[in-house]
Amino acid sequence: MRYGYFDDARREYVITRPDTPVPWINYLGTDEYFGIVSNTAGGYSWHLDARLRRLTRYRYNNVPGDSGGRYLYLRDDASGEYWSPSWQPVRTPLDSYECRHGLSYTAISSSRAGIATETVYFVPRGENHEVWRLSVTNTRERAAEVSVFSSVEFALWDAQDDTTNFQRNYSTGEVEVVGGVIYHKTEYRERRDHFAYFACSEPLAGFETQREAFLGPYRGFHEPLGVERGELGNSIAHGWSPHGAHHVRLALQPGETREVVFLLGYWANPKDAKFEATGVVNKAGVKPVIEKWLDPQTVADALADLRSYWEDLLGVLHVDTPDRDTNRMVSIWNTYQCMVTFNMSRSVSSYETGISRGMGFRDSCQDLLGSVQLDGPRARQRIIDLAATQFASGGAYHQYQPLTKTGNDAIGSGFNDDPLWLVLGVAAYLKETGDTSILDETVSFSDGGEATLYGHLERSVQYTLDRTGPHGLPLIGRADWNDCLNLNCFSETPGESFQTTENREGGVAESVFIAGLFTLAARELAGIAALAGREAEAESYRADAEKMAAITAEHGWDGEWFLRAYDHFGNPVGSGKNAEAQIFLEPQGMCVMAGIGLTDAANPASGTLAERALSSVRERLTTPHGIMLLQPAFTTYHVELGEISSYPPGYKENASVFCHTNPWVMIAAALTGDGDAAYDYYRRINPSAREAIGDVHKCEPYVYAQMIAGRDAPTHGEAKNSWLTGTAAWNYVAITQWILGIRPELGGLRVDPVIPSSWPGFTATRRFRDATYQITVRRAGTLDSGIAEGASVTVNGERVIGTLLPLAPAGDTVRVEVVLPS
Ligand code: BGC
Ligand code: IFM
C-alpha cells in the first residue's frame, strides 16, 4: 500500500492522503531557526536549541496523534462551515488533499466546497523566522466570503519547564499586539530583550492571544469557538497560555486567488540599558523585517533562493545507476537526511522531544561522515565544538546543548567508544576538504587546559590505550556504540541492576567492537599524522592498530564470527557458547571495516576471518527487511548485560534490524569484493525500495529509520524512529564510497566501484575540492576501447595507474572513465 509517490523532478515526496500510518514529517530551516512539520501541519519551531529556545508548543504522545502545530482554519462565512486545509485538527473530509515535502519546505494543498488552498511553509535562508504562504482560490461560480484563522501556541521558554512547571508558567505569560503583530514576550524581563512574533500580511478582522479565549472552555483545536463563531475577541494574554491567532476576512470573486502571508519569528535585540531599565520590549528592530517579509515578492524570491541552495548542495554528487531507488536516495533524499542529522543530531523528531537530548558526541561525529561534503565550514566548526567537550583524558561528554555548547552533566561521560569517533569525523573532513589547518586549531578541554585539534585526536586514541582489560581488549565503560550493552551493570545482589560510578570505573568488561573501532581510528590517525609530516607518530599509530588487530583476531574471535565483548566476569558475549545472543552484528561490520582478518586466511579452504564473519551474518542475521543486530534474541532479562535485554525480542537493541549497523556490513562486503551482497543489503533497507509496503513499514519512505522490527517481533518489518539516526550517514558512505566507490581519501578522490554483477555500469558527477569529476563506469566488453580484462581508469582519456585520481585544478571539469573487469 502506498500513501503517495516520489516526484523526482521536483525533488518532492507527494503524500496523497492525510491519514498516513504515522505522521510523515519534514524539517524547516537550514541555519539557526528550525521547525518540524508533519503532513497535516503538526509540529513546532525553535531557534538554535529545541529545549532552551523553543518558540511553540508540542505535546508528544497526544491523542489524537500529532495534534498541535501551524494551523490555519477556513470558514465559509455564508454557511458557517469550517475546516482545516491541512485536514488536522478539524479532520473534516476534504475534496482533495496533497502534501509535498520538499527540501526544507512543505506545501499542503487541498480543496473543499469550491475553496482551494495551498500553504507553503519554509524558513528563508539566513533568517530567524518562518513563512506560511497561503493562497486561497475561489473555484466556485459565485462569489465567496471566507474567513481565514491562524493559530500557534507560544512557548518561548525552556521546553522542559513548559511541560512541568505550571505553578510558574501560568503566571508569566505576556503579549503585546501592535499594528496587527502579536508579540510573545514572556520571560523577556529577567533574560534579555527577546521575543517571538506572529504577523499577517492582511488587515485583521480580529485576533486572540489567550488560548482559552480562542478555543473556548473545554474545547480542543478541532473546534475553536472563535472559528465556529467567525469572530475573535481581541484578548490580551496575561498569564495562562499565550497564543497567536489572527482572523482575516476575504471576499473572493469566482476564480479569484488571494495570497496571505503569515510570519512567525524569533527576535533578539542587542543589550540596551535604556530598554532594560524601562522594562519595555524594543520592537523597533524587527519592524522593517516584518514589513519586508510580509511582501509576497520577498517571499517568492526567498523560496527560489532556498531551491537554489539545495540545487547547489545536491550538485556535490549526482548519480545515474540502473536502480531508481538508489538514484533518488543518493542524489536527493539520503543527502537531505544527512544534512538534517547534521543540524539536529538526535534532538528533535517524532520520537525525540528536543528536550532530553542535545547534540550527541558519537552521533554528531558520525553525522559528519555523510555531511562533510555539503558544508565544509560548518563541519569544521562542528568538529571544534565537539572537541571542546572532550576532557584532558581524551574522554568526552556524551552530549552537549546546541545553544550553550556545553556538555550535559546529567548524562556525563564514560561511553568508551565516544572519543574514537572524533578521529573518524576529522578524517572525513580532511579527506573531503584537504584543509589540514584544522589540525592546528587550539581547542580547550571541558575540564581545563587546551591542545591543538591534532592533540585532541592523540588523546582520543590514548584514551583507549589507557583503558584495556584482561585480554588486552578495550574496556567498554558505560557502553560502546550499543548504548544498551551495559556490561558493568552488575550488582552483588542477584537480580539487581545498577551502574554506579564505581562499578563503571572498576568494571573490566571489554568490547570487541571498540577494538575494531580503535583499529580503524588508529589507522586513520596514522594517515593524518603522515599527512601532517609526523612520520614517526604515524608509524607508532600503525603499530597500535596492528597490535589491536592481532589481539582482536586472537581474543575477539569466536570460531565463525567475531565475539561482541567479555562481560565483567570474563564471560564471552556474542558467542556460540551462549544460549541467547550468540552473534552480534556490530563487530562483524566494524572489525572487517578496520581490515581485521580481511586477508591471510590461516586455512585457505575455510576463508578469511572476514569472509567467515560475513557468511555467518548472512546465515544467522539476515531477513528480507534487513540485518538484525543479534540472534537469538534475548527472551529474558540479564542483569549483567544491562538495558539490552530489557527490550522485547525484535525491538531496538534486542534483535531489531538496527539500520545504522547494516551499512557496516555493506562496506565489509564491498571490501571483500562482493558487490552483489553489498547491494542486496543496501536495497533491503532502502526506504524508497520499501515504499510499496507502506502499511508494513509505516514510516516515511523518503528517509531511513533507526530500526525495523526484527524477525522475533510480531510486527516484523515495521520501522520506527525515522529521521535522526546514524543510518543516514552510514548508508550514504556505504553506497557512494564503497559500492559506487567514489571515495574521498587524504590523497584525493578514488574511484573504485564494487557494484552488483547485474549492473552494466553507472554515471556520476562529483564535485570535489573545487573541481568536477564526470564519471562513467562500465564493464569491460561494453566498450570499443579494446580493453578486455582488468579494471582501468582514464582521466580525460589518459590512463592512470591505480584508482586514485590525480587532483584536478580548481574550476576544472574532468572526464573519468572506469572500466571494470567483466
Ligand atoms: C536507544 C538509544 C539510547 C538508549 C539510552 C536505547 O533504547 O536505542 O538510542 O541511547 O536507549 O538508554
Ligand atoms: O549508538 C547509539 C546512538 O548513539 C543513539 N541511538 C542508538 C545507538 C545504538 O544504541
Image (spheres, grey):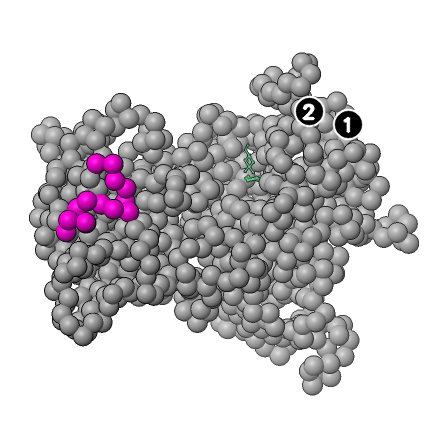
SS class, disc 2: loop
Work out whether residue 651 or residue 783 is closer to the camera in this orientation and state it.
651
Q: What residue lies at 46% left-to-right and 25% top-to-bottom? A: 410
Position of residue 595 in the picture relative to residue 697 (left or right): right
Q: Residues within 10 Å of mark 2 (few under 14, many from 20)?
A: many
**What secondary structure is found at the residue carrying circle 1?**
loop
- Residue found 59% across the figure and 77% down from its top: 796
Going by the image, does 338 lie left or right of 291? right
Q: Viewer-proximal residue, 185 or 93?
A: 93
Outermost residue toward the top in this view: 493
User: Would you name the residue on which mark 2 appears?
Assistant: 640
- View quadrant of ligand 2: top right
| Mark carried by residue 571 | 1
The number of discs equals 2
Q: Answer whether labels 2 and 1 touch (C-beta < 8 Å).
A: yes
Residue 756 image offset from top left, x and y in percent = 69, 67
Which mark is first along the chain, 1 or 2?
Answer: 1
Residue 218 lies in the magenta-colored region: yes
Which of the 4 image quadrants contains residue 423?
top right
Residue 118 image position (x, y, % from top left): 28, 63
